Image (spheres, rainbow, N blue to C red):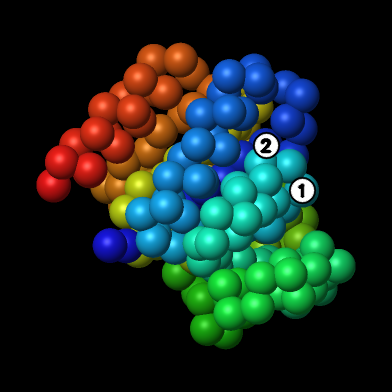
Amino acid sequence: MKPWMLVGTRELTTVSPTSIRVFQLAARTAARLGITVKTGAAKGADQLAAEEVLAGGGRVILVLPWGSYEYLWVEKMYYSYPGNVQDITFDERVHATWLQSVESLHPAPATLGRAERKLHARNYGAVEGSEVVVALPTPPERGGTSQAMRIGRYLGIPVFNLSLPQEQDKFSSWLRELRET
């Protein structure tokens, strides 16, 4: 099965405890099913997802905007879970499509600085080739999480916004269907 992309807010206090629990359940379910999880390694939901997957014996691919991004945490994950962590670092020369996604899908690309462009571009690399995007955005959808959700929708990948109770129900149904196949 293709990897799942789990992405979310850096500000976990802005989402409900129930939404966080469902997001953690998604990460643990991926680990239990042997599905690799891709995430952007940002503080908050991204790191929470990776830690849940790794604690459950799963594998993660960290898609980084630059090599030193969240360096200490990334190194800790490599050291704590040898063989279960991989990373891909955005490179403008190699990942032109990732950067183009910022221009075509971000609502205000002209307002972004160089670092912000890289942060948003790496979302394309995390979403592309994924089975599903499981998102925990700060309501309403905004920031890098919403960019990942736009990319998923653009690529025709199912996107679940776990900040919304009705989307939690849809995700649960999607999981049931997945287990039955």
Measured as percent of width and height from the top left, residue 9 is found at 67, 37
Name the kind of residue labelled 1 in the image: Lys
Tell me the crowding category of disc 1: few under 14, some 14 to 19, or many 20 or more residues within 10 angstroms, Cα based. some
* Rendered image quadrant of residue 140: top right
Is residue 89 visible in the rendered image? The answer is no
Q: Residue furthest bottom?
A: 93
Measured as percent of width and height from the top left, residue 171 is found at 35, 30
Q: Which of 13 and 116 is in front in this view?
A: 13
Whether residue 40 is situated above or below residue 22 in the rendered picture: below
Residue at image location 26% in from the left, 27% down from the top: 173
Q: Nearer the viewer, residue 155 or 13?
A: 13
Q: Which of 19 and 93 is in front in this view?
A: 19
Whether residue 44 is situated above or below residue 61 in the rendered picture: above
Quadrant assignment for the N terminus: bottom left
Residue at image location 61% in from the left, 29% down from the top: 20
Residue at image location 64% in from the left, 18% down from the top: 16
Helix, strand or loop for disc 1: loop
Measured as percent of width and height from the top left, residue 155 is found at 31, 52
- Disc number placed over residue 43 in the picture, else none: 1
- Disc number placed over residue 9 in the picture, else none: 2
- Disc number placed over residue 28 in the picture, else none: none
Q: Which residue lies furthest to the right in this view?
A: 72
Name the kind of residue labelled 2 in the image: Thr
Helix, strand or loop for disc 2: loop
* Rendered image quadrant of residue 11: top right
Residue at image location 61% in from the left, 49% down from the top: 52
Discs 1, 2 touching: Cβ within 8 Å: no
